[in-house]
């Protein structure tokens, strides 16, 4: 059986699973006025569910890079959905941290192999055989049998008792960093502690790429502000491209331990410190909460009028990148495998969202 026919059969099985659940399913739907096809369009009662179907390959889970490639198309299909979110159905596992980030980022649902097996009913054996037959797939993507069994029980299927639950994995270095970040209080009295945890997070997530970090203390709006400045190692494609595009010799991170979302004045203050003439036009502003819309508008102006890139990263963004780094270290693999799950994928998405949102 060819790889292409495997993909077609996988799509057919996903469609049949939905039919068995009472959906009317149409395959390969071309929507008028758009170049996008919908692999499967499922309709039941008042629910219209568009699905993008991807088989995947090999025994490794779907990486962040692939989720970023597929996520926007699935998000676009949301305009055709009713009563639910569009779905990305994949014939491989998706790490829970990656799933949570992608589902929130693109407002979609992800059905991985465990989800599909739990819903497969009488088709489970055939679906499992197809997934197990994929190249280099010695096991079913490392999916825990008890996870599948729990999902089957939730859907009303009777299964044999699961094996005893294994002990919880030991906390990772990333877990400890996230706990420190969450425990750090906001406000100027805790600015130093916030700067220290930000430095440690950057070292953990980007330690091989951002080098020679230096801290420069100054005062802004009566709150201590600590700038972290790094030079970029030449081997990482993301950082090399970013600094080349903006003619930057250094990258700056500014820590703002504010209790409330930062506003435009904090952007103006930081912008004055940046300079295209001295090759310092890039700053990532680390702050506890997502920025106020006026801050975003001020950052748009700095980019549009002065070619200065100021991107705000909240605690939520830092935590997502730390978790991505944990997964990358846990999964290991080849250089290509590691790049699939590199935390810069999340950072690059934030830059893309920012630049794409700049008005004329």
Image (cartoon, helix red, strand yellow):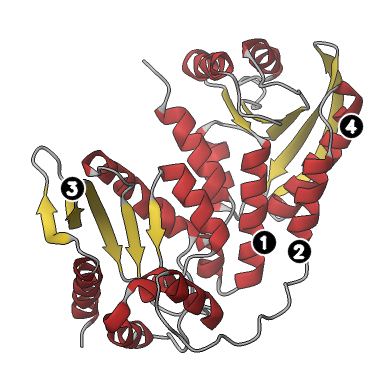
Between the C-alphas of marks 1 and 4, the distance is 25 Å
First of labels 3, 2 by sequence position: 3
Asked whether the beta carbons under mark 2 and mark 1 sit within 8 Å of each other, the answer is yes
Q: Which mark is residue 36?
A: 3
Marks 2 and 1, how far apart in space? 7 Å
| Residue under label 4 | 192
Front in this rendered view, residue 336 or 14: 14
Quadrant (top left, top right, bottom left, bottom right) of the C terminus: top left
CA gap between label 3 and label 1 equals 35 Å
* x and y percentages locating residue 350 in the rendered image: 52, 37
10 Å crowding of disc 2: few (<14), some (14-19), many (20+)? some
Identify the mark nearer the N-term, 2 or 1: 2
Which residue is pictured at 42% across the width and 26% down the height?
Answer: 357
- Marks 3 and 1 close (CB-CB < 8 Å): no
User: 258 or 219: which is nearer to us?
Assistant: 258
Residue 326, numbered circle = 1
Q: Determine the image quadrant of residue 67.
A: bottom left
Q: Earlier in the sequence, mark 3 or mark 1?
A: 3
Residue 199 seen in render:
no
Residue at label 2?
172
Q: Residue at x 34, y 58 (%)?
A: 88
Distance from the alpha carbon under mark 4 to that under mark 3: 50 Å
Q: Reading the chain from its start, which is encountered first: label 4 or label 3?
A: 3
Q: Secondary structure at mark 3?
A: loop
For the residues labelled 4 and 2, the Cα–Cα distance comes to 24 Å
Look at the picture and state if 136 lies above or below 8: below
220 lies left or right of 353 = right
Q: Tell me which numbered mark, 4 or 2, is placed earlier along the sequence.
A: 2
Neighbourhood count class around disc 4 (C-alpha, 10 Å): few under 14, some 14–19, many 20 upward: some
């Amino acid at each position: 059986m060819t790889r292409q026919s495997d993909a077609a059969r996988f799509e057919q099985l996903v469609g049949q699973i939905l039919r068995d659940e009472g959906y009317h399913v149409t395959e390969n739907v071309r929507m008028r006025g758009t170049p996008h096809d919908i692999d499967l369009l499922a309709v039941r009662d008042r629910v219209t569910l568009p699905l993008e179907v991807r088989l995947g390959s090999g025994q490794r889970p779907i990486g962040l890079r692939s989720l970023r490639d597929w996520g926007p198309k699935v998000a676009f299909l949301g305009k055709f959905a009713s009563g639910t979110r569009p779905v990305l159905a994949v014939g491989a596992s998706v790490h829970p941290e990656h799933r949570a980030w992608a589902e929130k980022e693109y407002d979609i649902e992800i059905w991985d192999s465990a989800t599909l097996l739990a819903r497969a009913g009488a088709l489970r054996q055939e679906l499992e055989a197809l997934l197990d037959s994929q190249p280099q797939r010695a096991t079913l993507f490392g999916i825990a049998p008890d996870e599948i069994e729990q999902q089957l029980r939730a859907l009303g299927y009777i299964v044999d008792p699961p094996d005893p639950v294994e002990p919880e994995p030991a906390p990772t270095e990333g877990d400890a960093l996230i706990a420190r970040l969450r425990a750090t209080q906001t406000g100027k009295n805790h600015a130093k502690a916030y700067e220290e945890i930000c430095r440690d997070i950057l070292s953990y997530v980007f330690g091989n790429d951002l080098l020679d970090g230096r801290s420069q203390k100054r005062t802004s709006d009566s709150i201590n502000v600590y700038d972290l400045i790094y030079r970029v190692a030449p081997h990482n494609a993301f950082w090399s491209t970013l600094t080349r595009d903006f003619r930057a010799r250094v990258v700056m991170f500014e820590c703002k331990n504010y209790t409330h979302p930062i506003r435009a004045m904090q952007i103006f203050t930081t912008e004055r410190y940046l300079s295209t003439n001295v090759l310092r036009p890039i700053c990532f502003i680390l702050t506890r909460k997502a920025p106020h819309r006026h801050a975003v508008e001020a950052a748009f102006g700095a980019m549009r009028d002065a070619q200065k890139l100021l991107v705000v990263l909240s605690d939520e963004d830092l935590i997502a990148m730390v978790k991505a780094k944990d997964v990358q270290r846990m999964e290991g693999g080849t250089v290509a495998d590691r790049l699939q799950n590199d935390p810069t994928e999340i950072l690059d998405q934030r830059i893309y969202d920012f630049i794409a949102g700049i008005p004329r």
